[in-house]
Structures are given as C-alpha cells and as structure tokens.
Image: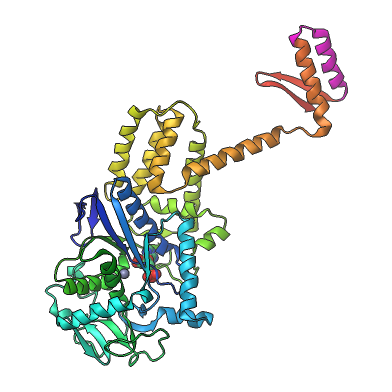
Amino acid sequence: MLLYNSLTHNREEFVPNTPGRVKMYTCGPTVYHYAHIGNLRTYIMEDILEKYLRYCGYQVTRVMNITDVGHLSSDADTGEDKMLKGARREHKTVMEIAKFYTDAFFRDCQKLNIKIPEIVEPATGCIPEFIHLVEVLLEKGYAYLAGGNVYFDTSKLKEYYVFNKHEAENLVVGAREGVEEDENKRNKTDFVLWFTKSKFEDQELKWDSPWGIGYPGWHIECSGISIKHFGEDLDIHCGGIDNAFPHHTNEIAQSEAYLGHKWCNYWFHVLHLNTNSGKMSKSKGEFLTVSLLEEKGYDPLVYRLFCLQSHYRRSLVFSWEALDNAAAAYKKLVARIAAVDENEGTLEESGIEHFRAEFHEALGNDVNTSLGITVLYDVLKSNLNGCTKTALIQEFDTVLSLGLIAAARRMREENARKEAEAEAVSPEDQFIVDAIAARTAAKKAKNYAEADRIRDELKAQGITLIDTPQGVKWSRD
Ligand code: AMP
Ligand code: ZN
C-alpha cells in the first residue's frame, strides 16, 4: 500500500520491518475531560488504517497509551498538569478523573466502531520503564539535571526538527505557545524528561526516582510504552498533526538517542477538525462530544461517515449543516443496501475480484476513504446478484466500519413494520375483509350474481370496492 510518511513528506510503499507483521503505535487521549469529535477524527482515521492493513493480511499489533500524568497545559512543558486541572474542576482525585474519562473515551470509541487496540497502557503503570530510559539518556550524555528536573539536551542531536525543517524558527517552543521560557533549559528546544516536586509542589501523583520525588514528562511516555511492548523498532506511529511538534519530534529525539539507531519508519498524521470559528476546544464555545451528537439525534456512525467522506490529510471544518448532509448520505446509502435482496442467488466469485481491486486502489492509495465509499455505490449499481452485493459490502465494511449491513436490515424491518401497520385491519373492519374474500371465491366459482350481491351489500353500507392488479381495495364514502 502507498502511505504518506510525514518524515519524508512523500507517499511511500509501505514495507514493515518484519514481513506480514505491523507494529503500530498510537498516542492515546489525555483523560482529563471527554474527547471532542476532533480528537475522535484522528482515532477514526487511525482505525481505518489499522483495519485496512488487517484486510491486506497483515498481522497488526497496536499499542496505545493513556496519558494520565505529565501532560501540561502547554505542550511545551509549562502550565499545570491537565489531569490536575480536571481533578480540581470536578473535586475528585486525579485517578478518579482518569478512570472516569478513560471509560468515557472507550464508550465513544465503541459508538464510533473504533476498535480498541489490543494493548492499552496508562502512563502511571510504566514509571519504572520511564525512569530507566531517563537514566540511560543521562548516562549517554543526552540529558542533564537543572533546577531539580531532568531535561533532554537537543543540542546533542545532529538534527532535531525532523518533520518540518523549514519551519524550525516558527516552531520554537515558547514562541509558539506564547509562554514564559523555562530558565533551566540550556537550549530553547530542550524538554523535560522528569519533573521533580521542586518545580511543581502541588502535583498529586508523584513517584520516587534517582532525581527526587516527581513525575515523568509527557513525551517520555510514548517512547517508554512503545519500547516496552515493541522493543527497538516500530513500523507506524500515529497521532493528530499537532502531535508532530513538539511531541513526536521529542519522542524521536529521546527514543533514537536511547536506542542508538533509527526507531520508527512511518509517521501517520491526521489533520485537524476545526469549527467555523477555528480551533476545536473543550473549554470555549460548543463542546462537541459524541454524547452531544446523540442528544441532537444523530447516529454516531453518521459522524464516522462524515470523517470518511474527506481525506485524512486535509483539515476538515465541522458544521451542523455538514453533519446533516452526512446523515442524508448515510440514510441514502443504507436505503440502497436495504433494497438489495440478500437471498438472491449464490456468491458469484467471478464478479468479485474487480471490485476488490477497486477497493484496494482507493484504500491502498494513502487511505482514500471517500473513494472507498464510491466503490460501495459501484457494487450497488452493478449487475451482481443480491447475495454477492451483500457479501462485498459486508467485506468492505470490515474496514469502513459503518455498520451498513446491520443498518440495512434494521431499515428493512422498519419498512416491513410500517407496511404491516398500514395494512392492518381493525376488528370493526374485519367483516369487509371477510366479504371481499367471499366475493373473490364467488367470482372464482363463476357465481357472478353472488359476487355482485356482496358488492352491492357493502355499497349499501357506504363501502366501495375497487378491483386493482394488486387485488381488491376498499374505501369508505
Ligand atoms: P489529547 O487527548 O489532547 O492528547 O489528543 C488526542 C488526539 O487527538 C491526539 O492525537 C491529537 O493530536 C488529536 N487532536 C487534537 N485536536 C484535534 C483536532 N481538532 N482534530 C483532530 N485531531 C485532534
Ligand atoms: Zn504520544
């Protein structure tokens, strides 16, 4: 498959280190609040990538961290720990907040048909691994102690700005965030590996370390958790585009300094979902969550379709109007599938390969999901029988995960229920149905006099019979 790699700025043929196997790492949520639908766009697109790789036959192992400590209000190691902020807001402990929002995150994932990675690791569960990493970085001369904290020394690297070389100056930490410079840093771009309580007295979760009681920096989490589960290499690392700098840049710096060689081959970054007024926020304006979509009557899978209709490397603007369009598109697609007779014919193997190739052309070309959806329409428009169409849609939906077959079955049941309701006869009208049956029988026996008598009798009661190709209908005057 062709995959755009942020590291090389090119679409490349994806080749994992071990043939047939893929090691995939995902930056997980910071569980201080609900995820907004922007965060979830990133997880939806990563989910598609994972499922497509599986569809291609790869054995994928996916690891995700849960950030429950160390992510400060600014990605540049300043401000308060986001978890502590959440705990204050809700008068709970940090661990209570972490549990509550981790569960909420996975519930959202489930509603959006996002598969939960086989390995999910909270940062607070890996403190010894982080300490070990920091110790090695100090030993190797890549880190230093200042003001009680341990910092990574970016001047020791041949190249620090691995993603956006030309933007180096714009991206300098502090300048970007408009926050105060940390006086302990030797270089502007240095970052914290381990905080001690000398800097943050009020941090709730703290651990003993060779440098005093404290807690890990945010970036070391992902290096530590990836190396713990995957060892010295990684095929794909994913996250939202905001993670590229400084988070992923710092992850690469510390992982490669620790390992002494290249760490991860492909970097998959999802562009942001924005609102008309700009950046999506959890504190300002409308807080767009999956629950809010549901409260407003949207099926969460409509939001999934909304995301799949555009390419992950384009930023996307959310509006209720755009979501309404996605809802209409979802309904239309499901209605088209509902109109297919699943039991028509048997599987036509010969007709399948052409559409599989089309699907690979779409998803295998840097995860072109909107083209993938077009393939569904091509299947529906084709001359394949109902059984084959259904099988193909079900197969492609293992990747797209729009719940299409189930939704179509529900729609068929709903339509049948409505039809039956419309045709249902009330007990008071049962005599009409019986009279019609008697008249039909009389006609069949060529007893036309009797048939006319029944019709006239009904007419006298104000009931008119109409003969149609679909059978006899009746109406009241
Ligand atoms: P966080 O919980 O803040 O650590 O973010 C979780 C994931 O959501 C990260 O991969 C972020 O890069 C990503 N993310 C944050 N904001 C957006 C957005 N507006 N659109 C898409 N992804 C986002
Ligand atoms: Zn991360």
- Please state the quadrant of the image where ligand 1 appears: bottom left
Could you tell me residue 271's position as x and y percent?
A: 33, 61
Residue at far top of view: 446
Residue 267 pos. (x, y %): 25, 61
Query: Going by the image, does 392 lie left or right of 427?
Result: left
* The furthest residue to the left: 158
Specify the quadrant that holds the C terminus. top right
- Residue, x 48% and y 67% (percent of image)? 103
Figure check: 255 above or below 146: above
- Above or below residue 105? Residue 143 is below
Is 113 or 161 nearer to us in this picture? 113
Q: Which residues are magenta?
A: 444-461
Assign the magenta stretch its main secondary structure.
helix
Query: Magenta span has 59?
Result: no
Q: How many marks?
A: 0
Between 369 and 95, the one nearer to me in the picture: 95
Q: Give how far across and how far down residue 420 sits, in percent.
A: 68, 34
Question: Which residue sits at x=31%, y=33%?
Answer: 353
Decide if residue 283 is in sight here. no
Q: Residue 287 location, x and y as percent? A: 49, 68
Q: Image point 35% across, 90% down: which residue?
A: 197
Taking the image as drawn, is residue 72 in sight? yes
Q: Residue at x 85, y 17 (%)?
A: 456
- Quadrant for residue 24, please give it: bottom left
Image side of residue 175 versus residue 325, left or right: left
For residue 449: magenta?
yes
Q: Quadrant of residue 465?
A: top right
What color scheme is it? rainbow
